[in-house]
Amino acid sequence: MANALEVNRLTKRYKDFKLDEVSFVLPKGSIMGFIGENGAGKTTTIKAILNLVKTDSGSVQILGMDNKKNEKQIKQEIGVVFDGSNFHDALKAKDISKIMKGIYANWDDSLFNEYLRKLKIPIAKTVKEYSRGMKMKLAIAAALSHHPRLLLLDEATGGLDPIMRNEVLDILLDFIQDEEKAVFFSSHIIGDLEKIADYITFIHEGKIIFMESKDDLIYNYGIMKCGADDFIKIDPNDIVGYQKNHFGCEILVRDKSKMAHKYPDFLIDQTNIEEIMLYYVKGEKR
Amino acid sequence: MRGLLLKDLINLKTYGRSVILIVTVFTAFAFFSDDSSFTTTFISILFAIMAITSMSYDELAKWNIYALSMPISRKELVLEKYLLAFILVCLGVAISLIIAVIPVFMGNKADLLMLMLTVLTSGSVALIMLTILLPLVYKFGIEKSRIILFIVLFIPSILLAILAQTGLIMPNKATDLLIITLLQILPIVALVLFVASYFISVAIFNNKEI
């Protein structure tokens, strides 16, 4: 079993939204960033992976097991962090440790304490007294302390200041050192993903637009610049998305080197994930 | 299951302290009055409501979705709440019983058997209240259920009061005996309904989108 997570043509219809045949694969030993604007279907996808919503069709394999048939066993072996803390205000870190010990077969008190120390989480305070960032870190520490093999994080770095974010990202990178483990990480903070993700999956209006390795993505895509008059000379098939401005056109293209060969007169710039996402969502198509 | 129960008990700790305070006040009240049935009913309802309070804590923390991402099934989540509710009602009954019985040992004249019946009846009423309320909370959430709780509790009380006023029910030996017999089987009826309510809640919760 080389994949930690396999999502296969997952479909879920709502009145005004559809998760449309979502498929992607997360190999073990890697981190996948799951990006898309608010309402694109990120949280719905994660809920469907966790079997929290009923899907219309498709299947999910987690650590080689079906997410419906082997739900209990899977959930012993995954850690989940949702957007915001799900712990009650009255709890303290040591209460959480006691509660989790009664839930997870592999709960590891000393590992939890180690994470609390590493992430500088105050143990004398109740959750109510924590800042949003502290709550987030507590949830991450809790998700890691039963030796999970797969981590699912839904917007888990939102609300963290840059220093806290770095601490969390370091912990994720540390976690992935064991080649048997994997992280699935939804976020719209693209910077975080650029730092740590191996793969980027991009969802837009309930559909997967691409699933590619981050390096390929940054290396292959480019922004081609041309004058407004030259724009019609470009084959529409080569245009992923474009924006027109006073000086001409900026066009997002796939396969940068091939494009440079095909259109030698135009300049092609480096791009980044945020730009790619913007051109897909905001850019016009011809 | 153990973890979930522990979670609820820790969360109810502060609330429980205020309940103890209220119970103390009402115990004093019961000593000075001849009739302890009000106190026992009040205490039973107070303890039953703690189960609902724990559900509002869960709702506030968005606990359920998190719990379901752990190795906990929807059925277990519901079962734990019913178990907690049952434990709390039993606790309420036990405390009511002590409060009701103490004056007897202090020399007050009272029928011990009748007292037991009163306490068990108030426990049953609390259990029936939860029987109705818990599925409603699973269906509609805490906020809406609060209003329904009011209706569930007050309409029968008002109806009974009106009925008593009109004199349709004339207390006599025959009806007294009937009522006592009915009250004796009430705890069993309440328990059966409570178990049925659990299955209804599981069905509701299974169909709910989290």
Image: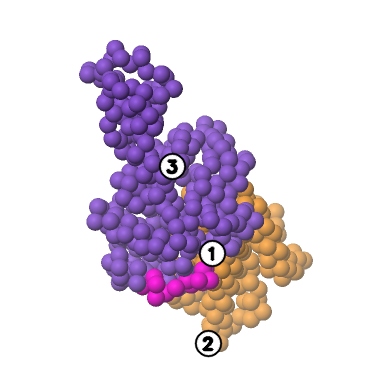
Chain colours: A purple, B orange
Tag 2: amino acid = Met
Q: Residue furthest right?
A: B174
Please rate how many residues cluster around mark 1, counting C-alpha atoms within 10 Å: few if below 14, some from 14 to 19, many from 20: many
Please rate how many residues cluster around mark 3, counting C-alpha atoms within 10 Å: few if below 14, some from 14 to 19, many from 20: some
Q: Quadrant of residue A236?
A: top left
Q: Does the magenta run of residues contain A110?
A: yes
Disc 2 versus disc 1: distance between alpha carbons?
A: 56 Å
Callout 3 and callout 1 share a chain? yes
For mark 3, give the secondary structure: strand
Tag 1: amino acid = Gln
Label 1: chain?
A
Q: Where's residue A232, x and y in %?
A: 36, 13
Against A153, residue A201 (above or below) is above
The span picked out in magenta is: A101-113
Where is mark 3, residue-wise? Answer: A212
Callout 2 and callout 1 share a chain? no
Residue B179: tell me if it is visible.
no
Q: Does the magenta run of residues contain B137?
A: no
Label 3: chain?
A
Where is mark 1, residue-wise? Answer: A76
Q: Where's residue B139, x and y in %?
A: 58, 49
Disc 3 versus disc 1: distance between alpha carbons?
A: 29 Å
Where is mark 2, residue-wise? Answer: B106
Q: Position of B24 compared to B86: left or right?
A: left
